[in-house]
Image: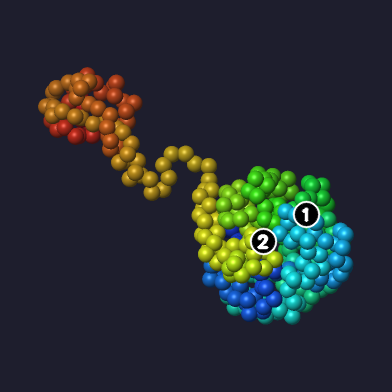
Amino acid sequence: MKDIQMGPVTIGENHPPVIVAELSGNHNHSITRALDLVDAAADAGAHAIKLQTYTPDTMTLNIHKGEFVISNPKSLWYGRSLYELYEDAHLPWEWHAPIFSRAAERGLLAFSTPFDATSVDFLADLNVPCYKIASFELTDLELIKKVAAQGKPMLMSTGMAELEEISEALRTAKNHGCEDVILLKCTSSYPAKPEQANLRTIPHLRETFGVHVGISDHTMGVGVAIAGVTLGAEIVEKHFTLNRADGGVDSAFSLEPQELATLVQETRNAWAARGRVHYGSSDGMENSERLNRRSLYIVRDKAAGERLEADDIRSIRPGSGLAIRYLGLLIGRTLQKDVSAGTPAAWELFV
């Protein structure tokens, strides 16, 4: 697969994983805080920031009863109406330009998730370098067509989608002008449990669809995301906040700055550790092998012309002598020079 260029970042097998800080609703109604989030993400070493572009009226109806109210008692947002939630979480559209500008100043890729045609048009006017399709919008083929027509790379979260739904979304994107699609393995629970992550899906998505893959992770901490990189995730998206204690609609499962910095470093380490299929010594291990592998050594002083007896030679550390497998071939041989205890066994010692 060819690399995908999105602004200042490159997605590809030979490039370290791209870390995306999802700001979502963690602005807490403050443009100053939103800009501080951008700076904190850059300081932590993230490569990108992502917003969500919608209004409560483009998402749902202003109704506060029945199915318009979150009724799952296990939900972080239990008892709230959908309209109230989106009103609380949405990022004012007039904030996008200054946030994108600050991101550019800090060398970050900045993009967003549109949720309807009007938000796609708005983001197109801002000339965003790529778009994200949220998990619950993966089956919204009209939205995918609209985004694909922009001709920019598209990230798609798979969420609860079945294979055929993912396939249909990919076909739609490619048939309507989008050549570069990245699939993000996602578990649409907030927060998600590690056992729900099913990370083995990451290589399966790549093998099945022949596209670049990543992970949009809603679990607590960084362990699941790091594990995702070992399985081939080339981009990692995590919700990000300045301080979980500050509250906010997404704060409970968002990373703080030091955690984000750890994610950046450890995903890079995980990517580097994947290496290649390899057996035997690796670069830099030669000295360790010499010191720690056993080999054959003469353990008694011996004179030239004497025969080597079984108790004259032993397998010990370090590893500078002949390999242990040659022990039977050396016992009984005649020495052609004087040797002292501690001499590594070598063929040239013998007649």
Viewer-proximal residue among 225 and 258: 258
Instruction: Decide which of 54, 123 is in the foreground and name it.
Output: 54
Give the amino acid type for the residue marked by disc 2 in the picture.
Answer: Ile
Q: CA distance from mark 2 to mark 1?
A: 40 Å
What type is the residue that disc 1 sits on?
A: Asn
Q: Earlier in the sequence, mark 2 or mark 1?
A: 2
Quarter of the image holding residue 138? bottom right
Which residue position is annotated with label 2? 4
Image spot of residue 289 (x, y percent):
35, 41
Tell me which residue sits at (25%, 27%) in the image: 314
Q: What residue would you read off at disc 1?
A: 72
Residue 13 visible = no
Q: How is the image coloured?
A: rainbow
Question: Taking 140 as reference, is 306 left or right?
Answer: left
Q: Position of residue 174 (x, y in %)?
A: 80, 58
Answer above or below: position of 228 versus 320. below
Label 1 residue SS? loop
